[in-house]
Image: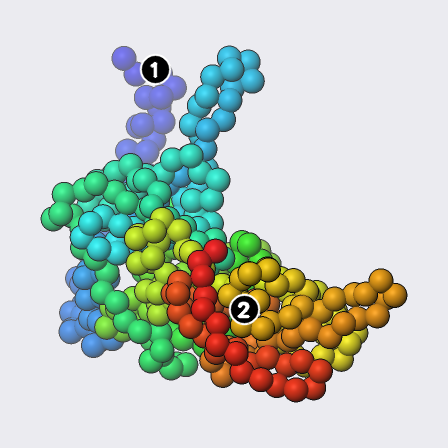
Amino acid sequence: MVSGGRLKVLLSLLGVALLASGLALGRGEPPAQPRPVSPRGALEADELNNINVFKRISPSVVHITTTTAQRDFFNRRIAEVPAGTGSGFLWDEAGHVVTNFHVIQGASSAKVLLADQSEYPAELVGLFADRDLAVLRIKAPPGKLQPIPLGSSRELQVGQKVYAIGNPFGLDFTLTTGIVSALNREIESVTRRTIRGAIQTDAAITPGNSGGPLLDSAGRLIGVNTSIYSPSGASAGIGFAIPVDEVNRIVPRLIRDGRFARPGLDIRAADPRLNRALQLPAGVALVAVAEGSAAARAGLRPFLQRRDGRIEAGDVITAVDNQPVSDWDALLNEFEKRQNGDTVRLTVWREGRTRQLSVVLRAD
């Protein structure tokens, strides 16, 4: 039953509607109707390519959610609580998923959501924090696993069009577009190691896009979106991606070994201040060479401080296979490009003289 007050309101509204209709008819105007839709015409070629790339590649992109285990203070029980979200992409038909290390850092478990909204628990296969890369694996039917096509970052040019597909702020499978703004940028990983050769783009990259693919206009993977430069944390038109050539070098080794075993030498580098204090050339000044190591057998010698305080001259590595190395980080970058057991030719400076030494690298 309608109350008296509510009935009065309804009758009043009905009266206003009848009055408005009567006024319109009194003026000879027809009742208001939806306007007809104007013909649109064909989509532009650029729009068609945007649509095509998204339709083809989005099945290769995944949404990652992570949880952490926390102990309840009162009940002393372990509970899984949400930790964060990110993006990733299918690497192969075996179910390997590539993402950023920082997306899964500190997580106790992770789940992967595919484009068809099916979800699978993920296991960690391997990680390399120095390059902010991690590989997960899901057990999904082969028909659901569409590996992303690979391109090459070596061929990129500033100004060419790029696409980013990811899950910004947890919103599933979003496409943004932009261009390659710059190449060979340097960004810092979570371990404070320098990631060289990064791609800069103005395609909108925001929290949740991390670990997702950066694509060229052919829909090929050219980078892994990893960070943005923004005081507010939102996209400011400056995003960075790890180049695909670097990814394609590291991911197979993570799948094979579960970690990236960096080949190297049993040496320890001096603080860069030693180079400045002794006016040494740019390079890696050695302060320790393991006895009996390949480095020692090759004749590498460290700087030593005698009891009287005087410095005994040692070696400065200035290049690896003729590629200059200005510091320890650059030396590690060169070693990472090689395999355990490879022989490298070092350019070594000592007391104003330069010589070449051949040394066999070993895995860390």
Q: In what element is the residue under mark 1?
A: loop
Image height of 259 relative to 106, above or below: below
Q: In what element is the residue under mark 2?
A: helix
Q: Which residue is mark 2?
A: 297
Q: Which residue is mark 1?
A: 3
Chain-order first, disc 2 or disc 1: 1
Horizontal placement of 125 versus 276: left or right?
Answer: left
Q: Amino acid at mark 2?
A: Arg
Residue 236 placed where, x, y %?
Answer: 51, 64
Inter-mark Cα distance, 2 to 1:
100 Å
The foreground one among 303 and 111 is 303
Total marks in image: 2
Image height of 79 relative to 13, above or below: above
Cβ–Cβ below 8 Å for labels 2 and 1? Answer: no
Residue 176 placed where, x, y %?
Answer: 35, 63
The foreground one among 232 and 356 is 356
Q: Quadrant of residue 244?
A: bottom left
Residue 287 placed where, x, y %?
Answer: 68, 65
Front of the two marks 2 and 1? 2
- Residue at 19% over, 66% down: 52
Residue 263 placed where, x, y %?
Answer: 45, 62
- Residue at 88% over, 65% down: 308
**Which part of the image, by quadrant, shows the N terminus?**
top left
Q: Is residue 230 visible?
A: no
Horizontal placement of 74 versus 151: left or right?
Answer: right
Decide: few, some or many residues near mark 2? Use Cα within 10 Å; few <14, some 14-19, many ≥20.
few
Q: Quadrant of residue 107?
A: top left
Q: Amino acid at mark 1?
A: Ser
